[in-house]
Amino acid sequence: MSVRLILAAFAGVFLGASLAGTANTWYVATDGSDSNPCTQRAPCATIVRASTLARPGDTVLVEPGRYEGPISTNASGTPSAKITYLSSKRWGAVIVQGSHGSAWANHGSYVVIDGFELVGDPQSLGTDGLETDGEYTIIQHNKAHGFLARTCNDWGGAGIHLNAPHGQVLGNWVYQNGPYPCQWVHGIYFEQPYGLAAENIAFQNGGYGIHEWHQSSHITAVNNTLFNNGCGGIVVGNEGLLKLGVALNDHSFTANNIAYRNGPCPNQAGRLEGYGVQECCRPAETGSCNAYHNNLVYGNYTSDVEVNIPAGPGNRGNIVSEPKFVNYQPDGSGDYHLQRGSPGIGAGLASDSACGIRVGFPTFDFSGNPRPAALGPGASGKAKFDIGAYQSSY
């Protein structure tokens, strides 16, 4: 059995920058100047300027304040020395969408983007918050919201949009992106294979909370909390075109997620639909080695679980029940921890396997609290792995 170690370094990833013996820190502040050397005493004014100085292992540290987009970064790290863009205070550095394009378009590989708030402008022509076409990008702890197309059209877009393989989206708060409802604009959008979405909270997005399409395959979506999205919680699919390179979404894991009260939105035929966990659309575009395990789903407009794989090894352990949040509010103002007695407490998996591939799941929750190893139902006196973005302390 092969092992996909996509989450082996999850705890380390949450700590921020990669370490390197000669790493530098470059400083950005709203009262800086791009003629400065980007030091702590003489910071730059823009992330773009600091990025031109960054080398593998370096950190670009951004002080709180408002920074106008669009931002475009091109610097690349290496597998052992990533470049990290870090807001010195979580959500303190606010990137505001410009008149066109993405608020932030990253083109570098082996990059970490950590702790920013990205804010859309309803008058902008762009529909993406944070977009990357750099391989091995890690997008974590960000808030992305308000990226609205003026009309619902097939240009597409998302709060976080990944158009390169091996992207990871960890512990983000993604909401109110796209006209509501709108099948083209989503919370988190994967277009390429080998992606990971873990510990995110996505709500009130026009389309899906998490959308896998185009050349998506080998995507792991685990321990996300997804509610009140226009079309659904998660959709697993592929455009099915060989000319794009990957025409089948297979070996994708969808596990430990909460999908609650999603939909409806009109499909292309005008019929209202809304799903918790969905596999779409033609069987030839999704494979037999996808796995749908231990998701907690309820109250979704059309169906809570709608997948091509029948009940059995690839489709098991899903719970159709009220999740019992501490304080559910559809607009994100509530508390999405689980109450005592929730069916999601202790019902998750610490790892999963299908068709000879085993995947390890995160050891930290949305807030950075550790998760225990899951022992399965009936193991009394031991802490269990919960479903959703938060681990309970009960």
Image (spheres, helix red, strand yellow):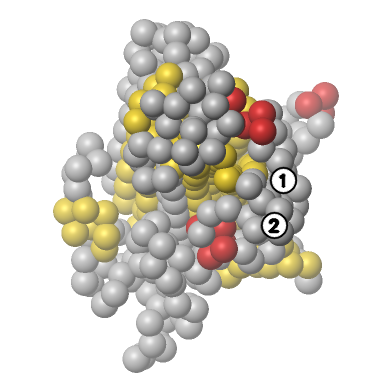
Q: Residues within 10 Å of mark 1 (few under 14, many from 20)?
A: many
Above or below 163: residue 268: above
Secondary structure of the residue carrying tag 1 is loop
Q: Position of residue 139 (x, y in %)?
A: 54, 43
Which residue is nearer to you in this view: 222 or 100?
100
Task: Please report the residue visible at 41 percent of the width from the left and 62 percent of the height from the top.
Answer: 368
Task: Please report the residue visible at 43 percent of the width from the left and 19 percent of the height from the top.
Answer: 68
In contact (CB < 8 Å): disc 1 and disc 2: yes
Q: Position of residue 22 (x, y in %)?
A: 71, 53
Which residue is nearer to you in this view: 203 or 40?
40
Secondary structure of the residue carrying tag 2 is loop
Above or below 219: residue 75: above
| Res 224 visible | yes
Say whether residue 131 is left or right of residue 215.
Answer: left
| Marked residue nearer the N-terminal end (1 or 2) | 2
Q: Quadrant of residue 272?
A: top left
**Residue type at mark 2?**
Ala
| Res 308 visible | no
Q: Dot 1 corresponds to which residue?
A: 56
Q: Position of residue 289 (x, y in %)?
A: 70, 55
Q: Residue furthest bottom?
A: 381
Task: Please report the residue visible at 75 percent of the width from the left and 52 percent of the height from the top.
Answer: 79
Quadrant (top left, top right, bottom left, bottom right) of the C terminus: bottom left
Q: Dot 2 corresponds to which residue?
A: 20
